[in-house]
Amino acid sequence: MEEYVEIPSDSGITFNVQPKMKALEIAEKVRDAILSRKFDQVRVNIPNGDMVGHTGDIEATVVACKAADEAVKIILDAIEQVGGIYVVTADHGNAEDMVKRTKTGQPQLDKAGNIQILTSHTLQPVSTLKTILIICQSLILTSVFSFMLKHVNKA
């Protein structure tokens, strides 16, 4: 059985105005799904760092990342309550480096000497093999791991 739940973003504002977005509401919905024991796995996307990072507002992005951390803690606490295991991963970066860089890695400056802000996804590799230290049946934070879940007990 599959069930899809979407929690719509706030409309009419940019994400840096409300950087916590719906992280708490998402976490509570996921927590309730886990504690219900109705599902073998739950996949969730917490978009704060990505979406707020696109605005270029560094202070708001820090708030967004803290909200995502709080949401993940709520979810992990629920997983521990049911004796589950989990994987936390990402498909790209955005909030970890919000400064445009030269080929040598130095901050890129505009004509006035100000650091240029990066609002696109970073080119940093996201190593899923290093990330996957624990594979689960309770929570998978990206659908990429659905395939892996099917093969965990066969390895």
Image (cartoon, helix red, strand yellow):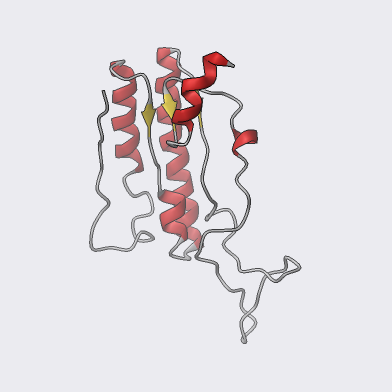
Q: Residue furthest bottom?
A: 111
Image vertical order of residue 117 relative to residue 16, above or below: below
Image vertical order of residue 50 relative to residue 146, above or below: below
Percent x, y of residue 98: 56, 62
Picture quadrant where residue 5 is located: top left
For the N terminus, the quadrant is top left
Q: Residue at x 28, y 17 (%)?
A: 38
Q: Residue at x 50, y 65 (%)?
A: 119
Percent x, y of residue 67: 42, 44
For the C terminus, the quadrant is top right
Q: Residue at x 27, y 27 (%)?
A: 2
Q: Residue furthest right?
A: 104
Percent x, y of residue 59: 49, 59
Seen from the viewer's position, the closer of residues 53 and 86 is: 86
Image vertical order of residue 136 relative to residue 48, above or below: above
Q: Residue at x 72, y 65 (%)?
A: 105
Taking 64 as reference, is 135 left or right?
right
Taking 116 as reference, is 33 left or right?
left
Seen from the viewer's position, the closer of residues 4 and 84 is: 4
Percent x, y of residue 41: 38, 23
Taking 128 as reference, is 86 left or right?
left
Seen from the viewer's position, the closer of residues 129 and 108 is: 129
Image vertical order of residue 149 relative to residue 153, above or below: below
